[in-house]
Amino acid sequence: MDTLNTAGMIFLSIIFESAPFILMGAFFSSLVLVFIPKDFFKKPLPANPLLSIPLALGLSAIFPVCECAIIPVIRGLVRKGMPLCAGAVFLAAAPVLNPIVLASTFYAFRFDLQVVALRFGMAAVVAMMVGFAVYLFLESGSRNKTDRKLPMSFEKEPANRFLDAASWKKIFDHTIDEFFTVGKYFIIGAGIASLFQVLVSQQAVFNLAESVYISPMVMMLMAYILSLCSTADAFVAASFAGTFPTMSVVAFLVLGPMLDIKNTAMLLGYFPARFVAVFMASVILGVYGSVVLMQYISG
Amino acid sequence: MLKTVILLLLAIMQVRLIYSGDILYYLAPQMLPFFYFSTFCFLVLAAYKALPAMVQAVPRQGSACDCGCPAGHESKLAEPVMYVLFGLLLCLGFFMPPKLLDSAMVEKKGIIYHQTTPRDIAQGPENELYTQPGTIDHEWWAEYQFDSPASESASITGEQQALREELGIWYDADYYSQLVQRLLGMDRIVVEDKGFLDIMLVLAAYQTRFQNREIELTGFVYRDMAMSQQELAVTRTAITCCLADATFYGILVRGDDLQQFEQDSWIRVRGLIDQDYVFDQNMIMITALEVENIPVPESPYVYPYLYRQFMPLEP
């Protein structure tokens, strides 16, 4: 009973912390839906979706959005015709590559700038790999692009004007519905994450981390289970810094924002299972592969 | 209609938490502006949905939203599931009594003891001592800028060096030199809830200088299997953003009759600073002179001072 009470506390704590950002995400995705014209992405983007990957990476470095906020926004953009692989790059890169996360990581690790550089360098590389994998498995050839063919009643309408009251009514209505949709998945994710927090002994998990090949896996698993916010995870990672090899801490810092229990629940609610499977597999393999490679290079 | 009610209830729940102050059981103070923001949003959105409904008295219909999705966003089953989940959230928010993270969580997450600087490193030049006995009023020196003499900041002492190496990630030369000077000037160190972690960090790093000095601090009792009857750890929970990132910091206390203090009960310890080699590490510890049970303090969680300089902001 006590355990459940504690789990409940952690659950509410995660919800309270994230609700403002989910609201902002719902609002921005509504803006995208209403104001971005349907052929917005068709004109400027190169014919080959692969070429949009570097562009998406650059853009995700500019926008300060976290993992809770970005999922509905990306779905809105994909439905407006953004290539799926560019969306995957956004999903992977934006929560790490943003000025606020840079600031907090820099702050927590300012005497180990190697970690800061590795976190952001590797996040960029892994995000590109994820984009490429999504292109390879889901977008190349003649595969159907289910996501982008969703009918949109807006397409028949004239472009929504910014000062039109009707546009803003749509935005508010959609924000509310989006909040409830994403909130539902978030509640499931936060619930599971809080149960893991009270039931899984981190001490026992850490004892598994003996070899340099296993300890990145352990740290990735911890990042997935703990479901921390990407601004706070640097501080938690700093407390692991003494116990774990540097590259394992980097693995924790790169994987956590891209993938954790709560955003898995949201991804599954918002994207087809096939996309989620490719996304998760490529993130996990990408992070693990590049960490082991870096360990090998640095001796 | 149900969504309007849920939004309104969410807003009421959050206002209630703010009003009672219980929100600090869930979030670190630096997250509060965001919490106010979400409360405000819930109120506005609830009002936005409620007002037209009251004026027209006709429920709007059609797809869940007017966004052009064929059948709203949801399958038939998803809608009730959504209400159940939000209902669960509201039930917990309204009816679950707040509870502090306790020793059960410490067992899961582990406890961090403040390690001391080995004696051979800790031989920096003797600094001038201030002679100001009294308790620490953390507030004033947190806000007050010291004019530290240039000579002091130029030479980093052995302990500062150690502080930097051992606890590198937290290190801030000016801040810690000032704090050390303050603490060295006190005959009796009373560690308040504010600045708890930073003070303990300094005491541990400069342990040789503080050897046998009197200290008073509060925390909850944590014991593990390895501890004897004369030992306990006086423990505090540190929160960065939310409870998910909680970390536990403990200070070993030794003394007679400590077994009478129960796990998770809050105590005030008065004792002398010492160090010992336990659990494979040199750690700061306290030889108890007097231990007493106290009620749970106003702010049971601690927040590192440095975190407050850096205000975590998201979008």
Image (cartoon, coloured by chain):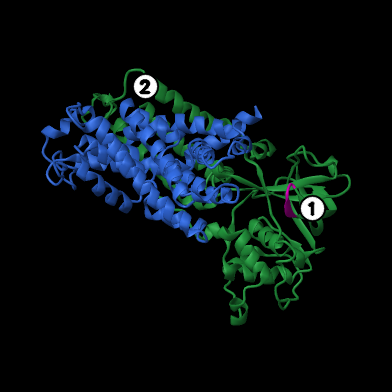
Instruction: Please give the residue where the numbered disc 2 appears in the rendered image.
Output: B78
**Label total for image:** 2
Quadrant in which the N terminus of chain B appears: top left
Looking at the rendering, which quadrant does residue B76 occupy?
top left
Say what amino acid the circle numbered 2 marks.
Answer: Ala
The majority secondary structure of the magenta stretch comes to strand
Give the SS element for disc 1.
strand
Q: Specify whether A34 is left or right of A117.
A: left
Q: Chain of mark 2?
A: B
Q: Is residue B152 magenta?
A: no
Q: Can residue B315 be seen by looking at this rendering?
A: no
Looking at the rendering, which quadrant does residue A200 occupy?
top right
Mark positioned earlier in the residue sequence (1 or 2): 2
Q: CA distance from mark 1 to mark 2?
A: 54 Å
Q: Specify whether B191 is left or right of A206.
A: right
Q: Is residue B139 above or below residue A130?
A: below
Q: Residue at x 62, y 73 (%)?
A: B156
Q: Residue at x 56, y 42 (%)?
A: B243
The chain letter corresponding to blue is A
Residue A284: x %, y % from top left: 41, 36
Q: Nearer the viewer, residue A267 or B79?
A: A267
Q: Specify whether B24 is left or right of A35.
A: right
User: Label 2 near label 1: C-beta < 8 Å?
Assistant: no
Q: Which residues make up the magenta segment?
A: B279-283
Q: Can residue B60 be seen by looking at this rendering?
A: yes
Instruction: Please give the residue where the numbered disc 1 appears in the rendered image.
Output: B269
Categorize mark 2 by other alpha carbons within 10 Å: few (<14), some (14-19), many (20+): few
Say what amino acid the circle numbered 1 marks.
Answer: Val
Q: Colour of chain B?
A: green
Q: Is residue B275 above or below residue B63?
A: below
